[in-house]
Amino acid sequence: MKSLIAAALLLTPPAFCADCIPFDQAPKHIGETHCVTGKVVRVHASRKAHYLDFCEDYRLCPFSVVIFSHDIKNVGDVRQLSGKMIEIHGEIKEYNDRAEIILDSRKQLSGQAALLPPLPKSFDVEQRGHFSAGTFRSKKGRATSKKKQTPTLPIEIPE
């Protein structure tokens, strides 16, 4: 009996899946809290944020997801979402005449995206993963020299 109940729970999609709307319908629901679903075509990183794009040309796409740099540690390695179907929950806001959801917590994701791995320890938001924060190396071969002072002209004192 318990195995039948467990199997039914596994085969039944969660209630929020039925309420997900396709990403192209998101502009009709600005100001509302919804689940939006779609396939992430690419993940774009800038200095201030990461963007999940659902269209080849993001400028023509009606919806996007924004993860600000200060929230990336709470979400995980969003670079892994490229090519995956995701379900994101949150308030649909308008920005530059397009709909968007700001992703600031891993809890907003469900489906394949819910299994997002944490960021690698060497990931640095400012350098997009190329450098580790807190490492300092001085430049080699750089000689330090003190700037020579220019001599002052003698002052003539009349006798």
Image (cartoon, rainbow, N blue to C red):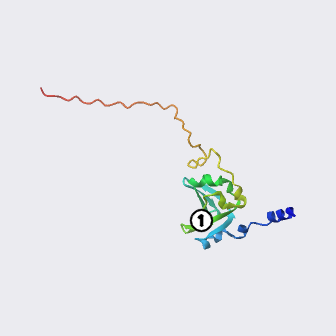
Image quarter (top left, top right, bottom left or bottom right) of the N terminus? bottom right
Whole-percent x and y of residue 13? Answer: 76, 66
Q: Secondary structure at mark 1?
A: strand
Residue reaching furthest to the top: 159
Q: Within 10 angstroms of label 1, few (less than 14), some, or many (20 or more) residues?
A: many
Residue with the mark numbered 1: 100
The answer to whether 57 is drawn above or below residue 132 in the figure is below
Q: Disc 1 residue type?
A: Glu
Residue reaching furthest to the front: 1
Q: Is residue 83 visible?
A: no
Whole-percent x and y of residue 19? Answer: 70, 70
* Residue at position x 61%, y 72% in the image: 29
Using the rendered view, name the quadrant where residue 136 is placed.
top right
The answer to whether 120 is drawn above or below residue 98 in the figure is above
* Residue at position x 86%, y 64% in the image: 4
* Residue at position x 42%, y 30% in the image: 145
Image quarter (top left, top right, bottom left or bottom right) of the C terminus? top left
Q: Is residue 103 visible?
A: yes
Using the rendered view, name the quadrant where residue 18 is placed.
bottom right
Using the rendered view, name the quadrant where residue 64 is placed.
bottom right
**Foreground of the two, 79 or 102:** 102
Whole-percent x and y of residue 30? Answer: 59, 71
